[in-house]
Amino acid sequence: MTILCRCENIETSEGVPLFVTGVAQVKIMTEKELLAVACEQFLGKNVQDIKNVVLQTLEGHLRSILGTLTVEQIYQDRDQFAKLVREVAAPDVGRMGIEILSFTIKDVYDKVDYLSSLGKTQTAVVQRDADIGVAEAERDAGIREAECKKEMLDVKFMADTKIADSKRAFELQKSAFSEEVNIKTAEAQLAYELQGAREQQKIRQEEIEIEVVQRKKQIAVETQEILRTDKELIATVRRPAEAEAHRIQQIAEGEKVKQVLLAQAEAEKIRKIGEAEAAVIEAMGKAEAERMKLKAEAYQKYGDAAKMALVLEALPQIAAKISAPLAKVDEIVVLSGDNSKVTSEVNRLLAELPASVHALTGVDLSKIPLIRNATGAQV
């Protein structure tokens, strides 16, 4: 049988009125002696009557036990409270042949908000403890987070330091390699330029040797040409009647040799422009020495005839210089009563010209047949 026990407005040991509801499961005992007791007590009664008897007994014990306990004991330890009720009520209902199978507290409440206040206090305590726990957890989490960040930064700084060290070592090694490469490159470039200079020196030396050979061949050809010319002149000057032709030919040959030597000197000068100044001066000196040597040989060989040729070459220039003032004269009037006198004056001037040249240069123009015939001079 299920019996619902209600105790309303029952004061606890602290005077707090409570409303308690409990549920009991009971049955009739089956042992012969106890069954006989139950029959004696309840024979002729229905089930509801039996429940009422048991209910009254349980409620009485429940009220008496509530008066000995505090609200906290009742509320916080319901199992202990139900166990106490069951232990106290079991002997009484047992003497009626009833056995309590179970007794539980279904509900406990009050109308003065004591339990709610108790709950608020507990809730506040719990909330306080929870807030403290949260704060401590956050503190611990913050400390742990800071420690983790510190460890992370330490690891990061160590890693950055190692990376920087590795990078510095790499840059130093790279700089060393670059320096070594630059040194090798510079050495190779210098060796290349040195070898190139040596090759250029060899080429220039070979060119000079070639030029020397060419010059020697040219000198040999010129020497042969001079010998040939000399032989030709010697062969042609054999008769006294051909003396004038011989002179003219010698003058022409001397001029030819002069022009050839001048052309050679000019060509030598142009060819040596790209060389050093000393080489140019040396080449010009050699050319001039060669020309003077040839002229000296020509003068020595041809004697008075060569000097005569030079004087004849210079006479037009001398005459030009002497007559330069007269170039500004538009007209010359010769006053003379006799035309033959003018002619005689001109002849006189022409006759005095060889003597003047001989006095200035030492060359006797009177030996030239053409001038001798023109001036009437006596040899």
Image (spheres, helix red, strand yellow):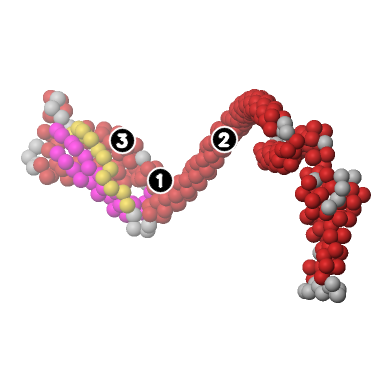
Q: Say which of 341 and 56 sits in front.
A: 341
Residue at the far right: name it: 359
Q: How far across and how far down the image is residue 15, in percent? A: 41, 52
Residue 72's disc number: 1
Q: How far across and how far down the image is residue 106, in percent? A: 26, 45
SS majority, magenta: strand
Name the residue: 81% across, 73% down. Answer: 332
Which residue position holds label 2? 160
Q: Say which of 74 and 280 sits in front.
A: 280
Q: Say which of 135 and 63 sits in front.
A: 135
Is label 3 in a helix, a strand or a loop? helix
- Please state the extent of the stretch shown in magenta in the rendering: 1-28
Q: What type is the residue that disc 1 sits on?
A: Glu
Name above or below for residue 374 compared with residue 227. below
Q: What type is the residue that disc 3 sits on?
A: Lys
Is label 2 in a helix, a strand or a loop? helix
